[in-house]
Image (tube, helix red, strand yellow):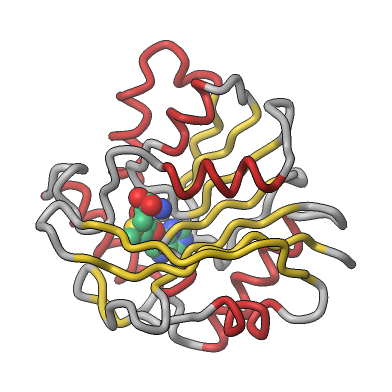
Amino acid sequence: MTPDNRKTHWQGVYRTKAADTVSWYQPSPLPSLEMVAASDIDPSARVVDIGAGASSFVDALLDRGFTRITVLDIAEAALDVARARQGARATLVDWTVADVRSWQPGHIYDLWHDRAVFHFLTDATDRAAYKATMTAALPQGGMAILATFAEDGPERCSGLPVRRYSAADLVAELGENFSLVVHKKEKHLTPAGAEQSFTWALFRRDR
Ligand SMILES: C[S@@+](CC[C@H](N)C(=O)[O-])C[C@H]1O[C@@H](n2cnc3c(N)ncnc32)[C@H](O)[C@@H]1O
């Protein structure tokens, strides 16, 4: 899929489907918040949500006093939904329309968060570009939360093929600069009632 096709695909999804009907919708971002707690960061931390979509993770961060938040997605239509939900506090957030593979972070972050984005990168070149962005965004000591479909998870999402990962697969994928802090499996229940197996992993950039 070319970058343009990818953008068109995701714009189409958010323009035509209500945010609470897509398979990845979750009423509350509890698994993310558990990982944030494990990361030991505090509300002064700078956080970026990669491929955030219309997720309520940003709402939860704002509720907890975080104010240095970047919400990034390739689809502006997704950010429009999340931004509209925030009312006046939307101005506290940096809303960034960008492709993670080519995004150049304007500063460094304490926490990188990605739920269900990395697993769409089925080409090694795309994964290398993603990791280059992640490495540019995170200093030594920076934390990263990655959630992907697990080894027993779905093979496709939103009509697109995905790559599935165990925690060990993610460790191998990120390489020696990142160490695994904690990981867990989650059974996500889609709005249609299907169970999807996710791998969640919290990493620290060591060097
Ligand atoms: C399955 S959705 C997950 C959305 C959100 N993270 C959540 O948990 O609800 C995948 C999201 O990644 C975004 N996305 C896909 N490829 C991307 C890319 N290359 N750069 C930035 N965002 C991307 C899509 O627009 C979509 O919002």
Residue beneath the point at 57% across and 85% down: 125
Residue 77: image quadrant is top left
Residue beneath the point at 50% across and 18% down: 91
Residue 82: image quadrant is top left
Q: Residue furthest bottom?
A: 124
Residue beneath the point at 59% across and 33% down: 69
Residue 203: image quadrant is bottom right
Residue 200, percent from left and from top: 52, 63
Residue beneath the point at 37% across and 28% down: 83
Determine the quadrant in which ligand 1 lies: bottom left
Residue 64, percent from left and from top: 56, 23
Left or right of 29, for residue 24? left
Vertical comparison of 185 with 49: above or below: below
Vertical comparison of 10 with 64: above or below: below
Q: Quadrant of the N terminus?
A: bottom left
Residue 62, percent from left and from top: 52, 23
Vertical comparison of 62 with 23: above or below: above
Vertical comparison of 159 with 135: above or below: below
Residue 162, percent from left and from top: 36, 80
Q: Nearer the viewer, residue 87 or 164?
A: 164
Looking at the rendered structure, the number of numbered marks drawn on it comes to 0
Left or right of 158, for residue 41? right
Q: Nearer the viewer, residue 123 or 19?
A: 19
Q: Quadrant of the C terminus?
A: bottom right
